[in-house]
Image (cartoon, rainbow, N blue to C red):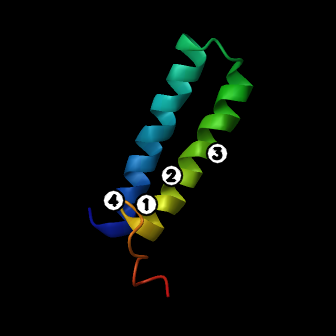
Amino acid sequence: MHGAMNHLFHSILFGILLYFVMVFILKQPYEVAQDRSMLLAALALAYMILFGHSLPNHVNKNIF
């Protein structure tokens, strides 16, 4: 797995982890946890596609 597919996989794992934390630890309703975890996972995916796993010191050259 390379590049964007790797970032997609990591954002999916991140979203699943957030969902379980929100439901079982923070005791949020299922619908709220689902929407919030998907939103945060989508933002994480956008960040990783733009900047990778590092700090934002350069933008992905394939974007522009």
- Does 44 sit above or below residue 64? above
> Rounded to the nearest whole Å, what is the CA distance between mark 3 and mark 1?
14 Å
Residue type marked 3? Leu
**Helix, strand or loop under label 1:** helix
Q: Amino acid at mark 2?
A: Ala
Q: Is residue 37 above or below residue 41?
A: above
Mark 4–mark 1 Cα distance, whole angstroms, equals 8 Å
Kind of residue indicated by mark 4: Ser
Q: Which mark is residue 39?
A: 3
Q: Tags 2 and 1 in contact by the CB under 8 Å rule? A: yes
For disc 2, the marked residue is 44
At a point 49% along the width and 60% down the height, the residue shown is 47
Query: Is tag 4's residue or tag 3's residue first in the polypeptide sequence?
Result: 3
In the structure shown, which secondary structural element does the residue marked by tag 2 occupy? Answer: helix
Quadrant that contains the N terminus: bottom left
Q: Which residue is mark 1?
A: 48
